Amino acid sequence: VPKAAEIRQLFVSPPGYSFIINDYSQMEPRVAAHYSGEDILKWVFEQDMDLYQQISLDIFGKYDSSMRKLAKTVTLAMFYGAGAKKLSWIIKNQLDKNLSYEECVEIVDKFNQSYPKITRFKAQVQAKIQERKGKLYNLYNRPLFITKENERSAFNALIQSTASDMCLFNNLAASREFFEYGHYVQLILLVHDESVWQVKDEHVAEVSQYLAENLTRFDKLGFTIPVKINQKVAKTWAG
């Protein structure tokens, strides 16, 4: 999936149309906060604060742009089930930063101490897998089948599948609202937690407002964490 702006600029809307690009903000950590009930994460999202700034302060006791990147990498690695050795490898490959095994042990321990409800819920997920012979269900009751070799990443699979379904089903529900508009309003692309709509220019204001108000609503799902999207209207996918 292209992320570089120079590649996304190649995707251009037809004359008279624009793209409405909706990107869910920090969806996976929000799902993790819902499942685990982790108090600090819930508070951060309720206050609309920067999650990775808070995690940087909690784990490293300081914050700047480089520490934010490290905090994000550590968080997602911990969701994936990485231990100290794997964490060291991830940080080296993603950030080109060398941290020793001992330093990563300290980071893992600090993360688990700072967010005990996440640690506890990850253990509960692994216990459920063993009880159900490798089967989990996400918030949409979609079954996930986890092999014994991948038990450590089961928590990540659960939050990834839930976040993906939340994005998918809310965008599909919104597309049904504009069915009568035909090709003037079309959902043309879903990539992870991002959706791209191709909309006739005369309908952009109406559609963008509807999407901003409804893509973040998960009342029927019983989702307890505020959800936020970043929305852009542009002539190319680059925004």
Image: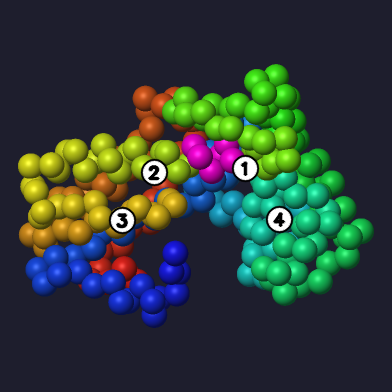
Residue 168 vs 140, above or below: the answer is below
Choose the circle earlier in sequence order: 3 or 4.
4
Judging from the image, what secondary structure is the residue with disc 4 in?
A: helix
Choose the circle earlier in sequence order: 1 or 2.
1
Whether residue 2 is visible: yes
Report the amino acid beneath label 2.
Answer: Cys
Choose the circle earlier in sequence order: 3 or 1.
1
Q: Are marks 4 and 1 in contact (CB under 8 Å)?
A: no
Please tell me which residue is depicted at 72% across the width and 45% down the height of the picture: 81
Please tell me which residue is depicted at 11% across the width and 54% down the height of the picture: 183
Nearer-the-camera pick, 155 or 133: 133
Point out the residue furthest to the bottom here: 6
Q: Residues within 10 Å of mark 3 (few under 14, many from 20)?
A: few
Please tell me which residue is depicted at 35% across the width and 52% down the height of the picture: 190
Nearer-the-camera pick, 117 or 19: 19
Depth check, mark 3 against mark 4: the one in front is 3
Report the amino acid beneath label 1.
Answer: Asn
* Disc 1 to disc 2, C-alpha distance: 17 Å
Span highlighted in magenta in the image? 157-162
Q: Which disc is residue 167 wearing?
A: 2
Q: According to the image, label 3 marks what residue?
A: 189
* Drawn side of residue 202 relative to residue 154, left or right: left
Whether residue 39 is visible: no
* Drawn side of residue 42 relative to residue 181, left or right: right
Q: Which disc is residue 74 wearing?
A: 4
Choose the circle earlier in sequence order: 4 or 2.
4
Q: Are marks 3 and 4 in contact (CB under 8 Å)?
A: no
